Amino acid sequence: MKSRARSGFAIDGKRRRSVMSMAALIDFTFILLIFFMVVTQFDRFTPVDVTIRKTPVKAQPRPEPQDVKTEVLHLRVKADGFFELDGEEIGDIVGFTGVLAHHQPPEKEAAENKPLLLVEPDGDVSVQLLIDTMHALKALPGFRVRIVSKEDGAAPASGRDAFAPPVPGREVPAVDEANGGATDE
Amino acid sequence: MSDPLGGNGDFFDHKREPDRNDRLIPMINIVFLLLTFFMIAGTFHAAELLDVEPPEAQSEGELPDEGPVVLIDRTGAMALGDERLDSEAVVRRLKEMVGEKPIEVRLKADRATEVRVVLPLLKALTDAGITRVQLIAVRRK
């Protein structure tokens, strides 16, 4: 009797409204929900340009006055997150931009001859720290920034300016902006 | 005598006693809303050969869809597509692709990968004629 009633027919043969149990629907919906919760990613990926730009070879290099020398600063990035400017500890990523800001030339002077900031990450510096460093340096438009690798003399880098081979001397001739609009972050 | 299934044939019969299903309806509504949210807001990504957690960056650009992807995990192991390769093999493979047309290489390195792994690879890619390399990062909130 009970089974006949559940089938939607009364005993007298008169059709009645059948009521479907929703338990199966809920089970299935929960499975779908759990599936989507597990496999879904909300991370939005974004590109950071790390193209190495070779120092441009120009047929006629820009003439430089003999007395104009570009100041070169060496910023060492250490794996512990601290920085050294020309061998002197200048704090972590929060503090080092303040120190570097003092080395920025006045605006007029900077337009003519920006100091070259060579960023030298230690080999065990993480990619994340390097990206954070380059992002912090974007706040200092008074420098031309290059990343140099101490390990193999490579010219890797990213950021606002081109990657370039390490410059051995403390003073180097002014270098053209080699970064044709590379966007750091 | 009332219907053992909780109804008397009239859907809008407010006098009928609420059954078990009625109490479940708000929950079903919520679950469906959540389901719809996850289906619309989420994105799917193909499973990758190496476990890579990309670095965060404050960038607004959109990642190009095309181009080979080089994976580098935190130990420095590399993969190109679905094949584990060493760095020389990666560069060699990419160099073969350059012959046909300019390619844009996407580099997906773990945030903890050391730069001693990444920087020489970038240098080698440039020497191989790759004109553009993009590091895949997660947009910082």
Image (cartoon, coloured by chain):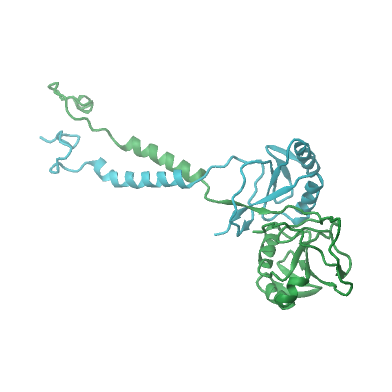
Side (left or right) of A35 relative to A152:
left
Residue B105: give x, y in percent of width and height: 70, 45
Quarter of image, res A126: bottom right
Quarter of image, res A59: bottom right
Residue A185: give x, y in percent of width and height: 64, 59
Vertical relation: A19 (above or below) A135: above
Residue at image point 69% right, 62% down: A129
Vertical relation: B117 (above or below) A63: above
The residue furthest top is A13
The residue furthest left is B1
Residue at image point 61% right, 42% down: B65
Q: For residue A104, say whether it is visible.
A: no
Residue B44: give x, y in percent of width and height: 53, 42
Q: For residue A17, say whether it is visible.
A: yes
Identify by letter the chain in cyan: B
Q: Colour of chain A?
A: green
Side (left or right) of A42 relative to A104:
left
Q: Nearer the viewer, residue A152 or B34?
A: A152
Q: Nearer the viewer, residue B69 or A60?
A: A60
Side (left or right) of B11 relative to A96:
left
Q: Nearer the viewer, residue A179 or A3?
A: A179
Residue A46: give x, y in percent of width and height: 60, 52
Vertical relation: A156 (above or below) B85: below
Residue at image point 78% right, 58% down: A163
Quadrant location of the N terminus of chain A in the rendered image: top left
How many tags in the picture?
0
